[in-house]
Image: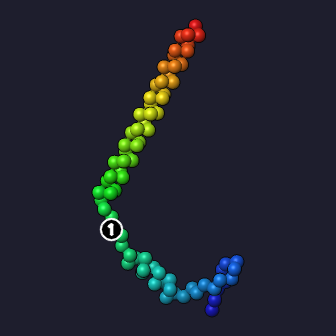
Amino acid sequence: MANYHYHNFKSIDESIEKKNFLITKAAVQKRTVDINILLNRLKLEKKTEIKQKIIYYSLTISLLFLMGVFITIAR
């Protein structure tokens, strides 16, 4: 028996056998992970994070310095 779930009336067979087959098929497929790739990605993320922090702090310090200069000139 076909079940109509979508607006275009595509029939979907919801048998238990197909559901179990899809679950076991997904469980059987395994991916290999290279630890070196993960470590390199982590190192690159740390480097970019450190660069962003340095840029943020240098902009903050330069902003404070310029505000101090303008305050002393305004007096």
Residue underneath mark 1: 32
Q: Is residue 55 above or below residue 17?
A: above
Q: Quadrant of residue 58?
A: top left
At horizontal 63% and vertical 92% (from top left) the residue drawn is 1
SS class, disc 1:
loop
Image coordinates of residue 19 in percent, x first then y, are 50, 83
Total of numbered circles in the picture? Answer: 1
Q: Residue furthest left?
A: 36
Q: Quadrant of the C terminus?
A: top right
**Of the pair 44 and 23, the residue shown nearer to us:** 44
At horizontal 70% and vertical 77% (from top left) the residue drawn is 7
Q: Is residue 37 above or below residue 8?
A: above
At horizontal 63% and vertical 85% (from top left) the residue drawn is 11
Q: Callout 1 environment at 10 Å: few (<14), some (14 to 19), or many (20+)?
A: few
Amino acid type at image mark 1: Thr
Looking at the picture, the colour scheme in use is rainbow
Image coordinates of residue 63 in percent, x first then y, are 51, 24
At horizontal 60% and vertical 84% (from top left) the residue drawn is 12
Left or right? Give the position of 7 relative to 40: right
Q: Residue furthest right?
A: 7
Q: Residue furthest bottom?
A: 1
Q: Is residue 32 above or below residue 6?
A: above
Image coordinates of residue 55 in percent, x first then y, are 44, 33
